[in-house]
Amino acid sequence: MRYTPLLGQCGPSGYLHGRTENCNKENDSDCCKGGQEYPQYHCSPAITGETHATMTINSFAKGGDGGGPSECDGNYHSDEEKVVALSTGWYNHGSRCLKLIRINANGRSVLAKVVDECDSVNGCDYSHDFQPPCPNNIVDASPAVWKALQIPKDDIGDYHITWSMA
């Protein structure tokens, strides 16, 4: 199933079969498991003035749990930079690359630069650090974003936010 504008729905377009390999578990990353199926999404929920999302943590640094260099600029980014990856549908074939988004959470707001795609279609392979595809509503944020929002360390993981284009 793909995005249906009349219904405002975005359902799985297929399922990826997982395989067990070594993945970087920095930031408590999920790792693929052999025999498990993971939903794949080519779409994300519609973007509004306050788009609801789940924020996850990701290191975009070399050797971090983000895998390879960022899609938008081919570079790694320090954990001190306020950068994010967006789920496939929101990433929209790179149309949001290097643009700023405003993230609202914990009574605070921060601007972050889009540098990568949180792939909602592919995963469980070397280029995705053997992590499953992202859900379709993810803003995968660097540690600097979490710090700027002053989210307590015990709450780091999956955190409800809203976001919009800056």
Image (cartoon, rainbow, N blue to C red):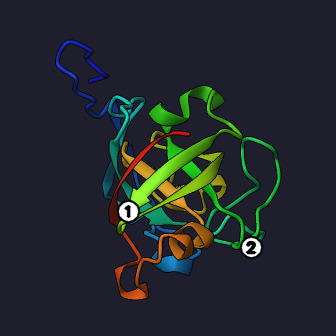
Separation of residues labelled 1 and 2 (CA atoms): 28 Å
* Residue 63 tag number: 2
> Which of the pair 107/17 is nearer the observer?
107
In the figure, 26 relative to 117: above or below?
Answer: below
SS of the residue at dot 1? strand
| Residue 151 numbered tag | none
Q: Quadrant of the N terminus?
A: top left
Is mark 1 in CB contact (under 8 Å) with mark 2?
Answer: no
Q: Can you tell which quarter of the image residue 164 is in?
A: top left
Q: Residue 94, percent across and down?
A: 65, 31
Q: Where in the figure is residue 52, as x and y percent of width and height?
A: 31, 46
Q: Residue furthest top?
A: 6
Q: Viewed as shown, does residue 62 lie left or right of 128?
A: right
Q: Residues within 10 Å of mark 2 (few under 14, many from 20)?
A: few
Say which residue appears at 52% left-offset and 45% top-offset.
86
**Residue at image coords 74%, 69%:** 61
Give residue 105's mark. 1
In the rendering, at what x and y percent does residue 113 appear?
A: 66, 49
Residue drawn at x 47%, y 77% is: 150
- The one nearer the camera, 49 or 94, is 49
Question: From what the image shows, is residue 20 above or below residue 111?
Answer: below
Q: Amino acid at mark 1?
A: Ala
Observer-nearest of 148 and 57: 148
* Quadrant of the frame with the C terminus: top right
Give, as a three-letter code, the residue at label 2.
Gly
122 up-or-down from 107: above or below: above
Relative side of 103 to 62, left or right: left
